[in-house]
Amino acid sequence: MEFLAQIMDFLKQPIRIAGVELPFSIGAFFLEFLLLSVLVFLAGVVLRRILAWALGKSRLREQTRDKTSRTARLVIRVSEWLGVLLLFARILGAEVLGFFGTLAALVNTPFISTGAMRISVLTLVALVPIGWLAVWSGKWSRYLLETRVFDRLKVKHSQRFSIGNLVRYVVMTLVVLLGLSAVGISLSGLAVLFGVLGVGLGFGLQGTVANFFSGLVIILSRPIKEGDFIKATSSDGTYEGTVTQIKLIYSVINTALNETIILPNSAIVGNSVHNYSYDDPSITLLIPIQVSYSSDIDLALEVLRDIGDACPVRKPRSETLAAIESFDDSGITLKLLVPLRRADEKYQARNTIHHQIWRRFKDQGIEIPFPQLDLHLKDHILRGITVETTSSENNKGGTST
């Protein structure tokens, strides 16, 4: 009984935080807030399960079903947190306004105050929507340029990337500066702060700074752009693939094996880059092939041209070229030049053409030579080998001098 009495006394004790006594006890907090909050979230889980079951049984289109599911889940999630907030206000009782007033004063109390700059918890919280607004404004401004302005002004595709990214980052910078000024952060104070930090961090962030300015160079000079098929070299190897993203610090390349390579921008600016689609996404695929000297060369060239013309990824209204490259030791080297629509299709085209060359040459009796070595021995060498072999057989079991 004494143990139960001690537990009851403990649950009736008020909660104190940093010397401030809250208007509810420990027991009220657990029973009237935590327990009911758990029940609220469990009810949300049940509602989401019922919603998923009902939408699965419905005959709505998949796109409409997904949109309805996302909206309903958002409403349920907001309702859960609203219910928790109401439960918390319920245990506060008549002190709720005073509590929120004290909380507001606490989060608005500056912990850094230098001149006109005052930074508090509320200031740091306000940075989150400022950052989100800056990112959203940058993306929206680039979208408006690409959909409303570039088409009317007939801006070239290669210039759209640079102008769009430049405008995006300028808008993001302006929104961040205006937002910082709105929440009471002095820009002059930030300049001094960044100047002091820059001296200490400059040596440790040399690579990051180099990548940042390399990103600006890429955006302004456009050696590569999103969608280009490139071959880039870095300290750990050479990568070939399609550029999917270009950021201020790094660029993302997707290879033919569906590998995602994150390449620092300084590696692109500081090394040679093979851009297959700098001005034109199409390339010409070169395939060498050898035939024997006994083969019909005219027939082999005609077959190669037919194979190139039948390539499924050949560039429309382009001409396939088949010609003699050189006369070599093992055979005659021919070359086939096939214009392709895009550079990233060369692997598919090479595989298809190689398969067709093997099949068509075999059907037409065109021989593909392979390296071989013929050994010619003169008569006196053969006689010497025969005499030595005979002497060895006569000397078996004894010793000759």
Image: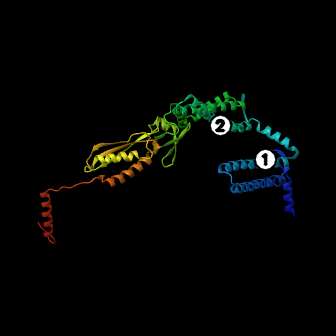
Q: Are marks 2 and 1 in contact (CB under 8 Å)?
A: no
Q: Residue furthest right?
A: 94
Q: Is 148 positioned to the left or the right of 102 in the image?
A: left
Image position, residue 177 (x, y; %):
66, 30
Disc number at residue 136?
Answer: 2
Residue underneath mark 1: 82
Image position, residue 293 (x, y; %):
25, 49
Q: Nearer the viewer, residue 137 or 387?
A: 137
**Which secondary structure lies at badge 2?**
helix
Q: Is 134 positioned to the left or the right of 354 in the image?
A: right
Which quadrant of the figure has residue 39? bottom right
Vertical position of residue 382 compared to residue 312: above or below? below
Q: Nearer the viewer, residue 257 or 239?
A: 257
Residue type of the residue flagged with mark 1:
Leu
Disc number at residue 354?
Answer: none
Which quadrant of the figure has residue 323? top left
Image position, residue 295 (x, y; %):
27, 50
Q: Nearer the viewer, residue 117 or 7?
A: 117
Image label count? 2
Q: Is 96 positioned to the left or the right of 215 in the image?
A: right
